[in-house]
Amino acid sequence: MAKKNKKKVIRPWCWYCERDFEDEKVLISHQRAKHFKCNHCSKKLNTAGGMAVHVMQVHKETIST
């Protein structure tokens, strides 16, 4: 009997909370909802960089890590 070739599936995962997701669309949706939401106006952004620029330009503040 021959060996079965098992391929390891790499799932996208969130750098911020270390959860893994079914696909990239679900990951992006999760990050927008949980990690990239402005505390001042509740705007949802796609990236951490976008969030930093938004807060700096709109609210005249800087984000500290």
Image (cartoon, grey):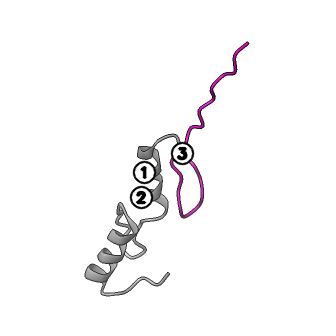
Q: Secondary structure at mark 2?
A: helix
Q: Residue furthest left?
A: 57
Q: Reading the chain from its start, which is encountered first: label 3 or label 2?
A: 3
Disc 1 marks a residue whose amino acid type is Ser
What crowding class fits label 2: few (fewer than 14 Cα within 10 Å), some (14-19), or many (20 or more)? some
Q: Residue at x 35, y 63 (%)?
A: 45
Q: Nearer the viewer, residue 27 or 55?
A: 27
Residue 58, by quadrant, is bottom left
Q: Secondary structure at mark 1?
A: helix
Disc 2 marks a residue whose amino acid type is Arg
Discs 1, 2 touching: Cβ within 8 Å? yes
Q: Which residue is disc 1 drawn over?
A: 29
Q: Reading the chain from its start, which is encountered first: label 3 or label 1?
A: 3
Residue 4, by quadrant, is top right
Total numbered badges shown on the rendered structure: 3
- Magenta-drawn stretch contains 26: no
Q: Residue at x 30, y 74 (%)?
A: 54
- Magenta-drawn stretch contains 5: yes
What crowding class fits label 3: few (fewer than 14 Cα within 10 Å), some (14-19), or many (20 or more)? some
Image disc number at residue 21: 3
Q: Which residues are magenta?
A: 1-20
Say above or below: 40 vs 14.
Answer: below
Q: Residue furthest front?
A: 2
Give the percent coordinates (x, y) of residue 9. 56, 38
Give the percent coordinates (x, y) of residue 41. 35, 72
Q: Which residue is disc 2 drawn over?
A: 32
Q: CA distance from mark 3 to mark 2?
A: 14 Å
